[in-house]
Amino acid sequence: MKKLYSLLLVVLLTMGAIAGCAEKKDQVNEENKAGVDKNTEVSYPVTVKDAIGNKVVLDKKPEKIVSLMPSNTEIAYSLGLGKEVIGVSDFDNYPEDVTKKEKIGGQEINLEKIISLKPNLVLAHASSAHNSEAGLQQLKDAGIIVLVVNDAQNFDQVYDSIAMIGKAAGVSKKATEIITGMKDKLAEIKAKAAEIKEKKKVLVEVSPAPEIYTPGKNTFMDEMLSFINAENIAKDQEGWIKIDQEAMIKRNPDVIITTYGYYVKNPVEQVVSRKGWETVNAVKNKQVIDVDSDRVTRSGPRIVEGVEDLAKAVYPEIFK
């Protein structure tokens, strides 16, 4: 009987040990699984609703990306996707690494070139999607996934664009970090601008004379000027408008910002030498400043730097 009890005890202890090992193994497996889930931002396949309402399905993380718009390219690079980007538009100039990438055209995209690159994902843009609808369909027919990104007209839409590309590329966490960083930086600028007592009147010129165009309300630039506590003297008009020079002279801007220095030599000199503008405060006080067009107009992560550029140009005594 004692031998029987001893044998039963050994069996029970052995079973307990086996069960314990199995439980520990299951626990390790669960921990490993949790670790994978924690480090994987997106589980593929993933569906992304793009800017024109298409539900774009990606079966796996894209390893080769072609960007048709500089803002898309800048977003992709900020998300750490520089190696994945294999083709960019002729207009891309930032970051410097884009100069090494294959060029796929400008206003007219080279469909054959794009198809030959065999990308997993093409980042198109809503601003040109309708005009190039047939071309984009040709890419889709070739088995290439096309994602149309927002034609962002304000900061919230820029954030949406970053989140969209981040989700498609499996880097949503990085996208969230970038968006949060942009919002934090913008909050700092706004807080500093709130201390300004005397708001300055600003005229922004996005093209030179004789046909001077300026942003009115519901434009990026108008929103950016409001962030820095400055008054857009064309805010009573909608969108991008050709200005009436006499009307702008009468409004007497304190600061004139130009954004065309990259293709017009001496833009400041062109403004201050205009006939009839010598009485304008901005000209009299030498407050005509050219800023980097890409940073203030390109709807990507650097747009916040553009806000800071404007702040330094309009309120140099505050934003040093």
Image (cartoon, rainbow, N blue to C red):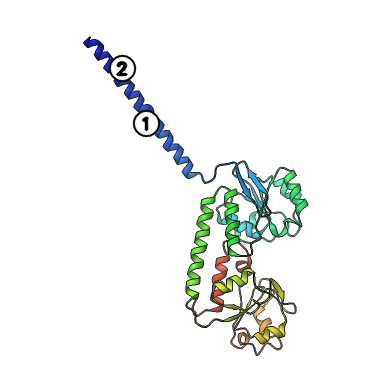
Q: Say above or below: 18 vs 56.
A: above
- Residue 281 lies, in percent from the top left, at 61, 87
Q: Quadrant of residue 72?
A: bottom right
**Camera-side residue: 1 or 72?**
1
Q: Quadrant of residue 132?
A: bottom right
**Camera-side residue: 72 or 137?**
137
Q: Which residue is mark 2?
A: 11
At label 1, which amino acid type do we have?
Lys
Please give the name of the residue rendered at 58% of the width and 65% of the height, measured from the top-left corner. Answer: 303
Please give the name of the residue rendered at 49% of the width and 78% of the height, measured from the top-left corner. Answer: 318
- Residue 71 lies, in percent from the top left, at 63, 60
At label 2, which amino acid type do we have?
Val
- Residue 82 lies, in percent from the top left, at 58, 53
Task: Kindly give the residue lying farthest to the bottom in the view shown.
Answer: 279
Task: Kindly give the residue lying farthest to the left in the view shown.
Answer: 2
Q: Say above or below: 222 vs 26.
A: below
Q: How many labels, in total?
A: 2
Mark earlier in primary sequence (1, 2): 2
**Camera-side residue: 24 or 273?**
24
Give SS at disc 2: helix
Q: Which residue is mark 1?
A: 24
Q: Residues within 10 Å of mark 1 (few under 14, many from 20)?
A: few
Task: Kindly give the residue lying farthest to the top in the view shown.
Answer: 1
Would you say residue 190 is visible in this rendering?
yes
Left or right, residue 201 beside residue 319: right
Marks 1 & 2, CB-CB < 8 Å contact: no
Give SS at disc 1: helix
Q: Say above or below: 127 vs 62.
A: below
Residue 121 badge: none
Measured Cα–Cα span from mark 1 to mark 2? 20 Å
Left or right, residue 198 beside residue 1: right
Please give the name of the residue rendered at 37% of the width and 31% of the height, measured from the top-left corner. Answer: 24
